[in-house]
Image (tube, helix red, strand yellow):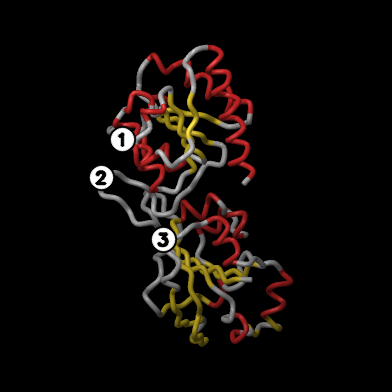
Amino acid sequence: MYNLLVKGNGWSDSRDEMDYSRIFEYTEGYLENRFKTNDTIDIDNLIKLPCLFMQETWHDGSQQNARVGVIVNAVTSRGAIKIEYALDNSIPPLTNEQLKEVAGEFGIADFEFLRTHWAVKDIDLYKILLRYLKPRRQLPNVFKIPEVERIEPSLISVMMPFDMAFDAVYETLKDITSGLDLHCRRADDIWENPAIIQDVVSLIDHSRVVMCDCTRRNPNVFYEIGIAHTLGRETILITQDEYDIPFDLRHLRYVRYLNNSEGLEALGEVVASRLKTLLNA
């Protein structure tokens, strides 16, 4: 179980209060009965639960942050409960946008983002955090990535030269991924940012697997391989010429193929097998 505490103007550093009448809003009856007898709240046991301190979502588009912590002391005073609490600095701030994506897992209804209240949820808070929200990453300066990675389970990206000579290769890879119920994209399929490098990085960052064609030793592809490796993405290297694989990558397995109908068919079979292995891992 955990306490969900939502306030309109956010939370101070260590002390705040909640109107007594707002406690147990959006709380299941059996939970309220567990921590309340008649009109008396069992504060001592209630504050033993871990807490998610959240700010109401505003309509102006500004981003709110939620924090995980514990209540260390609570007293009732003039119709309010005054609390002292400590935030868990090992868990990075969570935006309301992130929480909304998995709100059902946290037991939070949509309207709870818009209402100041104190609810009790019969859910293991830390288990859900470990499952859905990964630690904050060190952020680069050249391009932007979100603090918490959000990989799309069915997204496979392809890094290769933007050249018509590679169109048949790309179509082969798209056909293979489609047959595995996966979605394959290349950077030139999208235009979401002014700088193409940002589209490329975002695509890699959201991908489950990144396939990279080293043919012709294209420097952009090599740069993208480095980004994929740095972000911890599974990569599949392919090439038409084994000598196009850089020395620093020679220790990694790669797939050599011929750019003709038979060669592309063989490439598809090997890539499909590798994707199945990665997806089942």
The one nearer the camera, 5 or 87, is 87
Secondary element under disc 1, as helix, strand or loop, is helix
Instruction: Check if mark 3's residue and mark 1's residue have beta carbons within 8 Å.
Output: no
Work out whether mark 2 precedes mark 1 in sequence or the reverse, and give the earlier one.
Answer: 2
Q: Quadrant of the N terminus?
A: bottom right
- The kind of residue on which mark 2 rests is Val
Instruction: Check if mark 2's residue and mark 1's residue have beta carbons within 8 Å.
Output: yes
Work out whether mark 2 precedes mark 3 in sequence or the reverse, and give the earlier one.
Answer: 3
Q: Position of residue 88 (x, y in %)?
A: 45, 73
Q: Alpha-carbon neighbours of circle 1 within 10 Å: few (<14), some, or many (≥20)? A: some
Q: Position of residue 220 (x, y in %)?
A: 31, 31
Residue that mark 1 sits on: 197
The one nearer the camera, 44 or 279, is 279
The one nearer the camera, 253 or 59, is 253
Vertical relation: 179 (above or below) 99: above
Number of marks in the image? 3
